[in-house]
Amino acid sequence: MSDSSDPTPQGEKRMRQIRSFVLREGRLTNRQQNALENLGPKYLLEVGEQFLDFELVFGRRAPVVLEIGFGMGRSLVEMAKSQPEKDFIGIEVHRPGVGACIADADEQGVENLRVFAHDAIEVLQKAIPEQTLSTLQLFFPDPWHKKRHNKRRIVQSEFAQQVRNKLIDGGVFHMATDWENYAEHMLEVMSQAPGYQNLSSTGDYVERPDWRPLTKFEDRGHRLGHGVWDLMFKRV
């Protein structure tokens, strides 16, 4: 029996139980530590009581791309640098990755990038206004490849709708994985999610866009003989 005194919607409770990560904290290098301490005020965003105002964050109005789980941030920095007409927000809980990302961004003079060191589900719920993102990127998330753990995968029907709420009309949810079973899972979930259109001309996967850099996970997948699958679904 549910507690009628608890005002939290059951759907939101379920979403909070899904985590976008497994925390494997490593030791910070001096470079990463210095970046977090000295560059944090410039690059780091916090989850607060109000949604972000992207115009205030970036000082302009531009398409906003949000990436969940950017790892060490190399590809995210590369995308932001090569697409200065867009603004990028990354979410990552791994502090060494956050430190490396903002260090790289500063060294390369990237101004159109900000970062959350926080859980992605809470960032979406509490910090990202509805219908504001041009793209949401989820590249190589934890596949939870054991069947009994499949329910822990972040791409589920509720998450698909939460993402849709944050996308502008015509905005794109772009996923990539090097696990075929997870690709099939993503395709099944997204094909059943209302309010989306698959951008694949064959009704399944798309070719990797030129602007998505190859990641270390993708390289690893190729070395292990895995394929890599990209999925792109547009909000309609």
Image: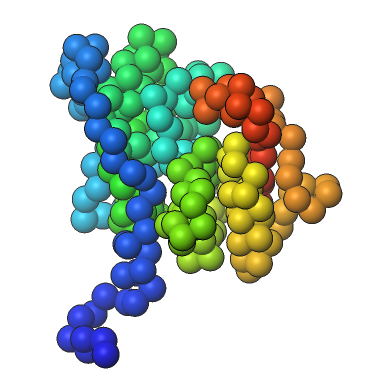
Residue that appears at 51% across and 57% down: 147
Residue that appears at 60% across and 27% down: 224
Where does residue 216 sit, x and y in percent of width and height?
Answer: 51, 22
Q: Is residue 11 visible?
A: yes
The mark tally for this picture is 0
The colouring scheme, among rainbow, by chain, secondary structure or one colour, is rainbow
Q: In this view, does 9 lie above or below 104?
A: below
Q: Which of 184 and 192 is in front in this view?
A: 184
Residue farthest toward the right in the current orientation of the protein: 202
Where does residue 182 sit, x and y in percent of width and height?
Answer: 59, 49
Q: Which of 207 and 182 is in front in this view?
A: 182
Q: Is residue 48 above or below residue 64?
A: below
Where does residue 106 sit, x and y in percent of width and height?
Answer: 34, 14
Image quadrant containing the C terminus: bottom right
Residue 112 image-quadrant placement: top left
Q: Nearer the viewer, residue 101 or 56?
A: 101
Residue farthest toward the top in the current orientation of the protein: 107
Residue that appears at 47% across and 49% down: 144
Q: In this view, does 95 lie above or below 154?
A: above
Q: Is residue 166 visible?
A: no
Q: Nearer the viewer, residue 78 or 85?
A: 78
Along the horizontal axis of the image, is 10 left or right of 198? left
Image quadrant containing the N terminus: bottom left
Residue 209 image-quadrant placement: top right
Residue that appears at 61% across and 54% down: 186
Along the horizontal axis of the image, is 211 left or right of 110? right
